[in-house]
Structures are given as C-alpha cells and as structure tokens.
Image (cartoon, rainbow, N blue to C red):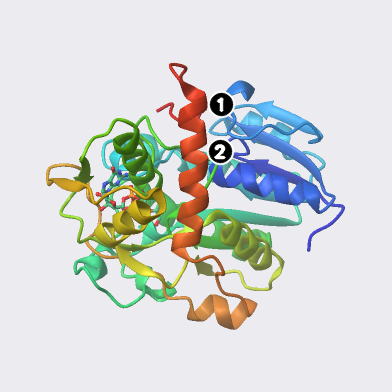
C-alpha cells in the first residue's frame, strides 16, 4: 500500500474524500487536504494532515497552489448528491468539469506522478438501464454516449479529459466508476443524501415518532448495487496502484430493489413493517442499474467484501447516533 508519499486529496471534506484521507494517514503518508467547504463543515476532522485548504478548485490559481510539491493527486471533488440533487442541479453539476480540467493542467505544470479521478455509474448509457433487472454494466457500456443528464455528462467528459492528458502529456491516470457508495460520515438529510442514508433516516424517524409509514420516491421497484465505503476505499487504493488506466467499476454484486433495501433496514431497526407511500413524481433516475465486476476481479484480483445488510447496519447505527446528538442543531451531514 502507498506509504511515505506526499498526497493531495481534493474533496477531503466530503464523504469518500474524508474516508480516503483517514486511510492514507494510517498508512503513513503526508497529506494535503483541500475542499471548497469551510473547515467546520468537513465531514471528518483531521489533526495530523500537513496542510488544510478551504479553496474552490474551479479556479486554476487555487489548483496551481495546492499541487505544488505533491507526488499523487486524488480528485474526489464535485458538486453532487443523490437523485434529489443531481436531477435538479444539472448546470451546477456540469461545472465540476472545471475542477478536473484545472487540476489536470496544474498537475502537468507541477509534474505530478499520478492522478486519480472519481467517476460514477452515472456515466453509463441510460438506454441500457431502462429495465428493473439488467445485466451488470460493463465498462464498455458507457459508449455510445448517453449518460445521465448534467452529472453523468460531467463524469464522462472528465474521464475523457484524463485519458487525453495521459495520452498527450504522459500523466498516469486511474479512474473508478463508483456505484452508489454509502456508509457513516455521509450526508443523510437536507437534499443531497442518496437512497441508503435517506431510507435509514426515514425508518429511524418513523420509529422514534411512532409513525407507521414512510415516503419512498418512485414505486420502489427500481434497482441498484450499493457499495460500502470501506470496500470503496480498498478498491480505490488497489486500482491506484495497478497499471490499468481505463475506467473501472468499483461496485458490489448485490443488486436489490429499493423495496428490498427498505426491508433490510426495517429488520435492522426491529420496527414493524411500515406502510410505503410511493411518490411517483419524485426524482427516480434510471430504472435499473448494477455493476459488472469482471474487470476489477481480473485486473486487481479483488472483490467487495461487505454485504449490504452489514454495511446498512453500520450506516443505520451511525445515523441513529447522529440524529440523537443533533437535537435542534443543524449538523454538517444535513446541510444541502
Ligand atoms: O439518490 P439515489 O441513491 O441515486 O437513488 C436511488 C433510487 O432510490 C432512485 O430511484 C430514487 O428515486 C430512489 N429513492 C427512493 N426513496 C429517497 O428518500 C428515496 N431519497 C433518495 N435519494 N432516493 C430515493 C446515484 C447518484 C450519485 C452517484 C451514484 C452512482 O444515482 O445520485 O451521485 O453518482 O448514483 O451510482 P442513484 O443511485 O439513482
């Protein structure tokens, strides 16, 4: 595993970025952590990072500043969220191309050794995701291009920008397509939360308030594969150290419907079965999505370890504790 390197993590104040910094610190690296958010809103606190910056990486001068004297760069930053955010903020999402582009230009100028880009399953052709149960998406299914509007186009364009920087300027790049990553220290309320955290929150609140129903976006039959954060970090670091420079799925094999996920969460909570109030006018995204993991198994000899029921239990318990702590205060995990 990577050791004694000078590593810049952009998006260190966010969910995946925060977990990555923790892991890289444990391995004995020197970390520069940057995020657009002011420090008090970062999802995890780090005392032992070398430098903290609260800067907007859409500005190239900021990118130039933070990439000086750095070996590796992990770009985990973009303006994002679950379906509720990305379907309603397409222009905002698209502007993250500036982060990746300005970072790559600065990495070239400052002679960075290797660059990581966090892409998404939203880069896949939406026409291949029209049925509830689909074959897992293979990496080649991103083309011909018809990704999710806004956010998905940003990811696909930025993947390509990475590829061309590698081809034209010899900057080694590694690209992961993440499939709905969930776990503790992520947003669970306020508009940016994804389904696992949102549904844990809804079940927790129903239980606390003695209510017998929860609201579900869509008809609950839509499917996804969800990946627990620890597996995501492990897969990311293994991919980073591999020789493979094309985009690779980092996801699980457990395709479930939203209804099935709610049942798992109800079992964790020990509550009685809640009535589902299906909200068909809410953002739904694609009908069915799952990750084909043949490539990652082949090139990294690695597969996800944490089953959905186990990852959801950890996530549920963490959100429950946060809600209890929160009281009337606004938490950094609920800001939209
Ligand atoms: O938000 P998300 O997890 O994003 O939603 C999954 C499904 O769960 C959607 O069909 C949504 O309608 C349904 N759903 C039901 N109830 C709720 O209360 C709820 N809140 C939310 N958020 N969803 C609910 C995500 C992107 C990410 C990321 C990943 C990559 O798309 O939003 O930014 O890139 O994909 O896989 P999802 O899986 O569509």
Q: Going 19% across and 69% down the picture, which residue do you hit?
A: 131
Q: Is residue 138 left or right of residue 83?
A: right
Residue behind label 2 places its C-beta within 8 angstroms of ligand 1: no
Q: Quadrant of residue 57?
A: top right
Residue farthest to the left, as pictured: 280
Does residue 318 appear in this view? yes
Q: Nearer the viewer, residue 77 or 107?
A: 77
Element assignment for label 1: loop
In the rendering, at what x and y percent does residue 282 appear? 18, 42
In the rendering, at what x and y percent does residue 321 appear? 51, 35
In the rendering, at what x and y percent does residue 52 appear? 72, 29
Residue behind label 1 places its C-beta within 8 angstroms of ligand 1: no
Q: CA distance from mark 1 to mark 2?
A: 9 Å
For the residues bearing labels 1 and 2, Cβ distance under 8 angstroms: yes
Q: Quadrant of residue 164?
A: bottom right
For residue 14, which numbered disc appears in the image? 2
Q: Going 48% across and 76% down the picture, which residue do you hit?
A: 293
Does residue 159 appear in this view? no
Identify the residue position indicated by label 1 in the image.
Answer: 37
Q: Is residue 76 above or below residue 323?
A: below
Q: Is residue 280 above or below residue 242?
A: above
In the rendering, at what x and y percent does residue 124 appear? 35, 64
Pointer 1 or 2: first along the chain: 2
Q: Going 32% across and 42% down the picture, which residue do you hit?
A: 203
Q: Is residue 119 left or right of residue 199?
A: right
Element assignment for label 2: loop
The quarter of the picture where the N terminus appears is: bottom right
The residue carrying pointer 2 sits among few (fewer than 14), some (14 to 19) or many (20 or more) residues within 10 Å by Cα, namely many
Q: Is residue 37 above or below residue 160?
A: above
The residue carrying pointer 1 sits among few (fewer than 14), some (14 to 19) or many (20 or more) residues within 10 Å by Cα, namely some
């Amino acid at each position: 595993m990577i050791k004694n390197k000078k590593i810049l993590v952009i998006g260190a104040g966010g969910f995946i970025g925060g977990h990555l910094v923790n892991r890289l610190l444990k391995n004995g690296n020197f970390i520069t952590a940057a995020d657009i958010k002011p420090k008090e809103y970062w999802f995890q606190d780090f005392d032992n990072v070398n430098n903290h910056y609260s800067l907007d990486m859409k500005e190239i001068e900021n990118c130039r500043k933070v990439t000086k004297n750095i070996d590796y760069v992990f770009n985990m930053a973009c303006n994002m969220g679950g379906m509720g955010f990305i379907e309603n903020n397409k222009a905002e999402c698209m502007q993250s191309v500036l982060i990746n582009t300005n970072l790559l230009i600065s990495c070239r100028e400052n002679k960075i050794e290797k660059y990581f880009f966090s892409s998404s399953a939203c880069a896949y052709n939406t026409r291949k995701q029209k049925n509830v149960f689909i074959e897992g998406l293979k990496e080649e299914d991103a083309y011909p291009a018809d990704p999710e509007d806004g956010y998905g186009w940003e990811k696909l364009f930025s993947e390509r920008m990475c590829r061309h920087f590698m081809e034209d300027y010899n900057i080694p790049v590694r690209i992961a397509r993440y499939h709905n990553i969930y776990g503790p220290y992520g947003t669970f309320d306020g508009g940016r939360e994804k389904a696992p955290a949102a549904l844990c929150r809804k079940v927790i609140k129903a239980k606390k308030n003695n209510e017998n129903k929860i609201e579900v976006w869509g008809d609950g039959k839509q499917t996804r594969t969800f990946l627990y954060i620890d597996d995501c970090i492990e897969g990311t670091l293994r991919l980073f150290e591999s020789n493979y420079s094309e985009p690779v799925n980092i996801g699980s094999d457990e395709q479930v419907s939203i209804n099935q996920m709610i049942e798992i969460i109800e079992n964790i909570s020990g509550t009685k079965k809640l009535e589902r109030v299906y909200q068909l006018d809410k953002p739904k995204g694609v009908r069915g999505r799952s990750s084909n993991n043949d490539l990652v198994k082949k090139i990294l000899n690695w597969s996800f370890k944490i089953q959905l029921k186990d990852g959801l239990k950890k996530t549920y318990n963490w959100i429950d504790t946060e809600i209890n702590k929160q009281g009337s205060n606004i938490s950094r995990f609920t800001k939209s």
